[in-house]
Image: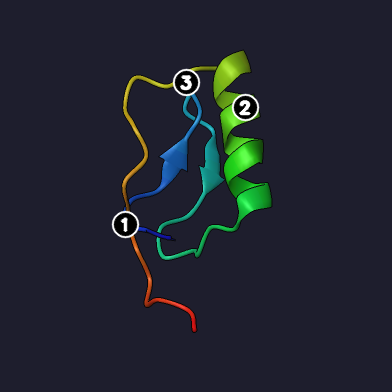
Amino acid sequence: MRLTRDIYSGTGMLLISKGISLDRQMIESVQRYYEIDPPTVGVYAILDGQRS
C-alpha cells in the first residue's frame, strides 16, 4: 500500500509522509501509535501493483 495523505498522530505530529509504501512493520507501528494517541481521521492509501 502507498499513502495518499500524510499520517498524523492525534496531537498533530507527522508520523509518515504521503507517497511512502507501507510494509507490515510500518502498519503495525502506526496501529500501536494510534492506540496511544488516536487521530480524528483515518489512513488513506492505495494498493500498489500486485507481486508475482
Q: Earlier in the sequence, mark 1 or mark 3?
A: 1
Task: List x then y, in percent, for residue 39.
Answer: 42, 22
Residue 18 location in percent, x, y?
41, 58
Amino acid under disc 1: Thr
Side (left or right) of 1 relative to 44:
right
Horizontal side of 39 relative to 22 (left or right) equals: left
Q: Position of residue 19 (x, y in %)?
A: 41, 65
Q: Quadrant of the N terminus?
A: bottom left
In the rendered image, residue 14, in percent from the top left (x then y), is placed at 52, 40
Cβ atoms under marks 1 and 2 closer than 8 Å: no
In the rendered image, which quarter is residue 15 located in? top right
Distance, label 1 to label 2, CA atoms, is: 19 Å
In the rendered image, the vertical position of residue 34 relative to residue 24, given as above or below: above
Kind of residue at badge 2:
Tyr
Q: Secondary structure at mark 1?
A: loop
Circle 3 SS class: loop
Measure the alpha-carbon separation of dots 2 and 3. 9 Å
The residue that mark 3 highlights is: 10
- The residue beneath circle 2 is 33
**Residue at 58% across, 17% down:** 35
Residue contact at pointers 2 and 3, CB within 8 angstroms: no
Q: How many residues crowd mark 3 within 10 Å: few (<14), some (14–19), many (20+)?
A: some
Q: Residues within 10 Å of mark 1 (few under 14, many from 20)?
A: some
Residue at 31% x, 46% y is 44
Q: Amino acid at mark 3?
A: Gly
Q: Are marks 1 and 3 in contact (CB under 8 Å)?
A: no
Q: Residue at x 66, y 38 (%)?
A: 29
Instruction: Decide: is 11 above or below 15.
Output: above
Work out whether 34 lies above or below 42. above
| Residue annotated with mark 1 | 4
Residue ranking furthest to the bottom? 52
Q: Nearer the viewer, mark 2 or mark 3?
A: 2
